[in-house]
């Protein structure tokens, strides 16, 4: 369950938060496929409660009302079409699977597919679920439970969301059927929402009943779905992520927390010389790494001081470090712009999601940030694909916030997070020749629209990163996007 089954040479997935299926299919064909992205985490595809009383917040999608594939992102036909077109473009689809719970109790009770529920009776006829399918006696998780009481964290309600009992044969079968239906449609795996709130033993049974990936969508025979379990473990809790790594991969929340600290200059970049398990991170193959996710970019979940698109220069620095560093499997966030942390995606008066528009410079409009379309970010996806499994070598630092390193003889990257300039002759490990920095610009014919770097026969090059440059990163590599 720890292999994402990316198409050959791809390494990185992006969370297209709240995107519509038709738009994702188009994005696979026009951008993600050609640019070498490996996959997409999509928003939950199953029917959720419509919450007009809160202006259709983004979090209504974490309130399942059935497993019918009808949401604001699209219907089953659109979903099927998206998965097929993305797989054809070499881009895998990973589903955010909400299997810990159903909705909370609201006065509204209609789902995005027209299904209704009777919350007071724990009744979800469109599945169907009834009282016996939920944990009993009913209780709600309190903050202290995370320190004392694993049983309460798993058997009580998370934010008042009706807590399914994954210990019963019936519930397991509903969940397995839902996930197997998605596998048959060609998805490559799952984010397991709220995994900490389910018993590892129950999850193991569910995972082991999943089918192999669908060979008709290009997966090798016998391939198991990629599973990354959302477990927030920053230390000090009764439940440890180590209970989940024997099952499948786990979301590495420490990754973005520590890099956010460092790139906000609350820690020095030089300490990143042993970034990885030396910092208490998960083993590389167990880790789904990211800077921000849909929760902590807006102060939900593990929250707090995480870099996002709003602090763009530092954010791009942290993302570039993640993509240049060999540890783990990286995930990028692609957001809609927000000031109100509850607000849902751009929508019209009827609640329909408004598609991102694509500007002439490749960026998005209509309220979509599309971080994955920022040159500094998509160029580093190509960098990571190029350097592959090569080792990190030739670490250099200035004893503070200027660092640089090589990836084999395939790539070189430098960072300047000081308030003074970086100007050094550094070992790039690359073959002699001319290269375009893929951060300050792109290669255009035989020219660079940004910085041009000349590597000598000794592999060394003059590297300049001004404190006031637009970006704090410089990256060159042996691939066609950089080498002249
Ligand atoms: C997750 N991971 O474990 C998701 O990443 C996270 O986004 C989900 O919470 C959570 N688990 C449940 O799937 C989000 C919001 C919550 C929201 C919840 C359900 O962060 O704030 O709760 O989705 O929509 C909301 C209200 C609560 C209310 C609850 C129940 O904010 O006040 O009690 O709904 O109706
Ligand atoms: Ca639970």
Image (spheres, rainbow, N blue to C red):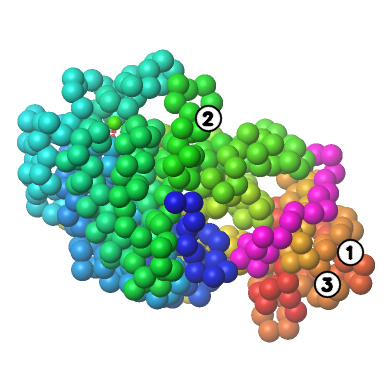
Which of the four quarters of the rendered structure image does ligand 1 lie in?
top left
The kind of secondary structure element at disc 1 is: strand
The answer to which quarter of the image holds residue 216 is bottom left
Label 1 sits on residue: 460
**Residue 123 in sight from this viewpoint:** yes
Residue 242, placed above or below residue 325: above
Residue 255 found in image quarter: top right
- Please report the residue visible at 20 percent of the width from the left and 39 percent of the height from the top: 169
Q: Which mark is residue 234?
A: 2
Q: Nearer the viewer, residue 153 or 266?
A: 153
Marked residue nearer the N-terminal end (1 or 3): 3
Vertical relation: 478 (above or below) 307: below
Q: Secondary structure at mark 3?
A: loop
Magenta part of the chain: 383-401
User: Is 63 placed left or right of 320 in the picture?
Assistant: left
Label 1 close to label 3 by CB (< 8 Å)? no
- Residue at 24 percent of width and 59 percent of height: 181
Upstream in the sequence, badge 1 or badge 2?
2
The disc placed on residue 38 is none
In the drawing, does residue 32 fall left or right of residue 390? left
Mark 2, secondary structure of its residue: loop
**Residue 340 in the image: x percent, y percent?**
36, 40
- Which of labels 1 and 2 is toward the front? 2
Q: Label 3, label 2: how many angstroms apart (C-alpha)?
A: 41 Å
Residue on which the image places disc 3: 431
């Amino acid at each position: 369950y720890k292999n994402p089954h990316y198409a050959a040479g791809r390494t990185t997935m992006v969370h297209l938060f709240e995107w519509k299926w038709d738009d994702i299919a188009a994005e696979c064909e026009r951008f993600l496929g050609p640019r070498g992205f490996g996959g997409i985490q999509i928003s939950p595809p199953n029917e959720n409660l419509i919450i007009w009383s809160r202006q259709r917040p983004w979090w209504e999608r974490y309130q399942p009302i059935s497993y019918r594939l009808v949401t604001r992102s699209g219907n089953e036909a659109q979903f099927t079409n998206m998965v097929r077109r993305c797989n054809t473009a070499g881009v895998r689809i990973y589903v955010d699977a909400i299997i810990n719970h159903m909705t909370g109790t609201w006065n509204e009770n209609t789902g995005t597919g027209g299904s209704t529920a009777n919350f007071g009776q724990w009744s979800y006829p469109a599945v169907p679920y009834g009282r016996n399918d939920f944990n009993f006696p009913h209780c709600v998780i309190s903050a202290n439970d995370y320190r004392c009481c694993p049983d309460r964290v798993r058997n009580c309600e998370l934010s008042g969301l009706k807590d399914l009992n994954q210990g019963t044969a019936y519930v397991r079968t509903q969940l397995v059927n839902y996930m197997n239906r998605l596998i048959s449609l060609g998805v490559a795996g799952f984010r397991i929402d709220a995994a900490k709130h389910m018993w590892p033993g129950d999850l193991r049974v569910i995972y082991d009943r999943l089918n192999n990936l669908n060979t008709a969508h290009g997966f090798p025979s016998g391939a198991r779905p990629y599973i990354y379990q959302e477990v927030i473990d920053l230390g000090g809790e009764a439940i440890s992520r180590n209970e989940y790594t024997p099952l499948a991969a786990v979301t590495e929340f420490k990754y973005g927390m520590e890099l956010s600290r460092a790139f906000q200059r609350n820690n020095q970049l030089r300490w990143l010389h042993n970034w990885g398990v030396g910092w208490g991170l998960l083993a590389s193959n167990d880790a789904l790494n990211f800077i921000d996710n849909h929760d902590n970019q807006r102060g939900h979940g593990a929250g707090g001081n995480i870099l996002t698109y709003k602090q763009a220069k530092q954010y791009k620095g942290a993302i570039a470090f993640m993509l240049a560093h060999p540890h783990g499997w990286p995930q990028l966030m692609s957001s809609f712009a927000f000031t109100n942390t509850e607000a849902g995606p751009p929508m019209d008066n009827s609640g329909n999601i408004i598609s991102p528009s694509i500007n002439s410079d490749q960026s998005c409009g209509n309220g979509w940030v599309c971080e994955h379309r920022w040159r500094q970010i998509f160029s580093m996806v190509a960098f990571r694909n190029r350097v592959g499994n090569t080792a990190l070598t030739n670490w250099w630092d200035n004893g503070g916030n200027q660092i640089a390193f090589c990836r084999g003889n395939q790539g070189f990257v430098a960072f300047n997070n000081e308030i003074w300039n970086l100007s050094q002759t550094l070992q790039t490990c690359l073959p002699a020749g001319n290269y375009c920095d893929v951060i300050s610009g792109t290669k255009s014919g035989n020219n660079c629209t940004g910085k041009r770097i000349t590597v000598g026969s000794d592999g060394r090059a003059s590297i300049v990163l001004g404190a006031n440059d637009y970006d704090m990163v410089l990256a060159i590599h042996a691939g066609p996007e950089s080498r002249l």
